[in-house]
Each structure stands twice: as C-alpha cells, then as structure tokens.
Amino acid sequence: MIQIKDIFAKDINRDIRGVIKIGQDSDDIKQQELEEYVVTDELKRNFTRFFDAYDKSINNPTDEMGAWISGFFGSGKSHFLKILSYLLENDTVKGRQAIDYFLQDGKFDDDHLADAINKATSVPTEVALFNIDSKADSNAANNDNSILDVFLKVFNEQLGYSPIAVVADMERWLDSVGKYEAFKQAFADLATTDHSSWVELRKNYALMSTKIKTALVNCGALDETDANNYVQTLLTKKFSIDATAFAKLVKDYLDKKGNDAHFVFLADEVGQFIGDNNSRMLNLQTIVEQLGVQCQGRAWVVVTSQQQMDEVASNFSKYERDFSKIQGRFNTLINMSSANADEVIRKRLLTKKPLVSDQLADIYSQEQYSINNKINFSDAIKRQKFDNAQEFVENYPFIPYQFSLLKEVLTAVRQHGANGSHMSDGERSMLGTFQEATKRYENDELGRLVPFSAFFIGMKEFLSHDHQVVFDRAQTDRYVNKNNEDYCFNIQVLAVLFMVRYVDNYPSTLENIVTLLLDSVDQDRQALTAEVKDALNVLMRQNYIQKKLDTYQFLTDSEREVNEAINAIEVDDRKVAQKIGSYLLTSNLIDAKYTYPHMKNQYIFEFNEYIDEMGLNRLSNNLNIQIISPLIADNYREIDFKQKAMDGKN
C-alpha cells in the first residue's frame, strides 16, 4: 500500500523553510526561494500595485514613498517582503538575475508587470531587510526613538559600519575624509598575535582606546593631541540623532551614488512593534516624512503589519491629525488575504503525483458521503468539508476547514499563549506548520487523515510558561500518559482544547473535539467519541480541563492552582441547598407565594424567613413548608404539605 510520503510531487522532507528568516541570504537559499515561490493571482496583483507605485519615483521626485503590507499571521507577508528585496536588488543568484526566475519562468505572465519590474531594476537599488523587533535594543520599551535607532542601525550595517551608533559615527567620518580603509589596516597592524581585524573587535571599542588612538595617528587622520581628545570624547559622549539628521545621512549617501540610486528599508512586523505606543507611531511618521521631504522618492520605507492602516489608526484616535500625516506617506496599501496562503500551501506542498491523484479521486468517489458525514460540528458556523473529488485530491491528507481554523488558532496563540507578544524568528508560518504535521504521518498508508492535533507539535516550544508547564506535567502524569508515549491520545485531546480555547467562534463541545481528532477516511466516529469521552474524564479528574455546560476548557497552570484550592474546600451539601433556596426565594427569581389552583384556592403557600434555617432543611428533604390558610390568616400553623394535600382530597 502506498505511503503518504510517496504521494507528493516534491519530497515532503525537503527544507522548504516555512519560517522566513531575515538574513538567510546564501545563494542556495535564495535559489530555492526564487524557484519555489508560488505567484497566485492575488500576489500578481500585489506585485503590480507595488511596482506601479515604485516606478513613479524613478527620475521623478516625489514624497510618496511608503508601502504598508498587512495580513494575518501566516498569510505570507514576510515572504512577500523578502521576495520584494530580491527583485529590487536583482542580484545574480546561481548564474541568473533574480527577476529572471520570475520573468523567464513565466511566473509573471503579464507584460505590464514585466515592464514595471524591468523599470524598477533599471536604477541601482540597495535594500535593508530586517525584523524590527529583533533589531531593537533591550531597552527599546523605554525609548521613544526606538524605531529611529533601529533604522539607523540597519542603515549603518548596510554601509559596512558598526551597529553601535557612536562607533559608526567615527567610521563615517573616517570614510568622509578618505581614511577609513587606512585606519582599519593601521588597527590590524597593532594586533600582537592573530592580526584580528577592526570589524571583528570594534564591538569592544571601550576596551581598546589606546589602539584606536594609535591607529588614528598612524593612518594620518589626526595628530596625537587631537586623537587623544577624540578618543576621550568617543568613550564618554552619548550619541543622539533625530529624524531630520538621519534623513540627511541617507540623502548624502544617495547623492554620492548618483544615477537616481534608491535605498529601500523593508521592515517586518512594524505594526506589532508599534502596538498602541503613540511615541513609536509618531517616531515612524517623522522618519517617513523626513525621508520623503529630503530624498524625494529615492528612499523608500516598506513595512508589514498584522493590522491594516485603518485598524492601527483606531489605536490613536486622539492623535488623528498626526496619524493622517503618516497615512499620507504610506499611500501604497497591500493586504495579504487568507486565500493566498491556502493556495500557496496546496501548490507548493500538497501537489500530488498524477497516478496518486487518480487513486485519491477513486477513494473519494467511493467514500464521499461517509467522509463528509464524519466531519460534523455542533455550532452554527458552516465549516468547509470536501465539495468534490478535486478538492479531496488538492487538500489530502488535510480537511479544508483546517486551513481557516489554523489561521485563527495561530493568531490567537500569538496573542494569548505565546512566549511574548509574538514568536519572533521562531514563528511558524502556515506552510511550515502544515509540513511538520504531514511529516508526522508520512509513513502511514493512503487513507490516513491528519488530525488537527498534529498542528500543535510545531507551536509547543513557543508557548508561554503558564501554558508550557501544563503539557510538561501532563506528559509525566501516569494517569494521563499511562505508557509514557511521546504524544499520547489524552495529550492530543488536551492540545486541541488549548488550541481552540482562545478562538472566539469555535465552541469546544464533545462533537467538535471529536471532529478535530478524525484521523482516517474510514474512522469509526462512535468509537472515537467514546475514546474522547474517556480522555476528557481523565483530564477533568486530573484538573487539566474543566467543563462549562456542554463545553470543555483548557486550564492554564495558574487556573489549575485556583481550581485545586477550590476543590480542597469541604462543602456541606445541606448548607449549599439552604443557600440556593434562600437566594431563589428572596431575590424574586421565584415568587415567594403560590396559590394551590384547586379546592377553591383556599391554600396559599408562602416562604417565611422565620423558618429559613429549619424550614429550608426540611424543604430539601420532604418539601415541608408552612401553609397559611386564608381562613386562619392570623394564626400561622406549620403543617406537612404532602399530608394536607391528601387530607384535602379525602
């Protein structure tokens, strides 16, 4: 029988780098990314929108030089940003220009787009591609100019200068007087053993004041007195710069390059970094504004964000006037939708061999009703099943609803369950997450379905401590994991409850949990339901989850502690019944009077607080209550309800 790993057109175990890491720029990696990048119709429109706007800045001064790329986590916006960097720089990769991987290979089968890209690459362009959070210093949270500091750092690094601003300032000055290369050689000559270079040692500049002073003198940049004063200033001054001065640095550099040279800052996850911090928002606005004014379209800023511009604007409503300025700079808006990510996964990862496609179509034609009947959900939201054989072939071994639900889970986990506000370079893209889930079942035979629980493996290591410790404890709990398995069924149930806990529109009912755990086209759903029930009972008994009406909820570590404290309290059932009865009868939820509708309405039943302690206890056992007869209203008598009712009938 054919195995799942053998059904795909490309090796499922190849390194497809589901995580797009900024800085991965070897030729092998570039070649694979350029060759395998899937250009959907939506992406084609997005590339056209960007290059049409970018081309307007070539030989044509403008202050419209910003692009805002938005999309949910895993939508491909970071990958799109990286491909933009390749196309704009247009370096030679394995003997071919970067744009040739698209134009010659037919990915851009549109003359207008091809002309736009050719025009964009007709001028020299340098790009600085970076994740803004990973480039920020550890004290960025307390720094109103943190975005400017990051932009300065990546600009300095792009020019070969130190990421330390004060050191880069010295290097820039040496460069301007034509002494930088001589200084580096003079510094290397001072090394006593291995001739370590300036670039390797400059991060420790504060410990090398003597060598720096001597090198400045030996290279002819300064005399000994001036060099001594300069180094003392270097060690003591605190470097500062504003957006205007930064923009001038960029302008001066571009002026030297000439030929309408362009510089493009490509900053990933800017929206996440800004959050609701108005200082950072205004910091970005000032940078973009000054680059636009001084560089006139030759310096671009392209950013990505989970939020669209108008969504970010809602965080700064009281600064509407300031925010309108930055909206005017980012006039090129690109939104990456969910359909794009789904199509990329199907084409890049799940494309099948021709013969396998026929086999899968046969399986669906024989089992289509049985398969779709097993995919049941208890909530009102309609979730996608298989509509036809082609959908089954394209999605197998996954179920269509898993694509949209996983997007919601990944976004929710980042907000509530990840270690920090986002997962930084450890982020799992949709593509990488689907690949990991497939590899877990690669040795299974045709007919296996990948359950939703398989997606948890790729995100587990990035969970916050409050969530991670729950799974660590469950793994070693002999009642939960009896056979000490790597990922036993009980923990799979716990995993899916965690994944959907923060998703607003997915109630974790028994039926919905069972559907998430379907793992075969011929699954016995009744047997699976029984197995899930057993798992839920174990997890509740061990205090990993709790039940709320008809849904089950994953408990964080802190919530488990609260539950354990509550469960440790001994409760007198009689007192509980008494409290409930008192609450119901005194809060107007239940009318305190009841008229018996027979026997001429002569019996009125009424709660009397005088007998609360004794009467409610009797009520909980024998429904003994006080009866007040309208004939003897002034003489209250306590009688047994059951006996009086029988006497009345007699």
Image (cartoon, rainbow, N blue to C red):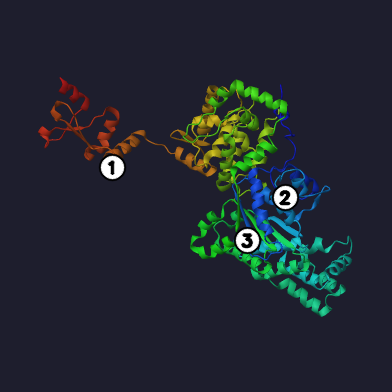
Where's residue 321, x and y in %? 52, 65
Residue extending furthest left?
Answer: 631
Q: Name which of mark 3 and mark 2 comes first in the sequence.
A: 2
In the figure, 227 relative to 475: above or below? below
In which quadrant of the rendered view does residue 437 lie?
Answer: top right
Of circles 1 and 2, which is in front? 2
In the figure, 605 relative to 648: above or below? below
| The N terminus, quarter of image | top right
The residue to which callout 1 is attached is: 587
The residue to which callout 3 is attached is: 140
Q: Is residue 257 left or right of residue 427?
A: right
Of circles 3 and 1, which is in front? 3
The residue to which callout 2 is attached is: 114
In which quadrant of the rendered view does residue 595 lie?
Answer: top left
- Amino acid bearing label 3: Ala
Where's residue 391, x and y in %? 61, 31
Q: Name which of mark 1 and mark 2 comes first in the sequence.
A: 2
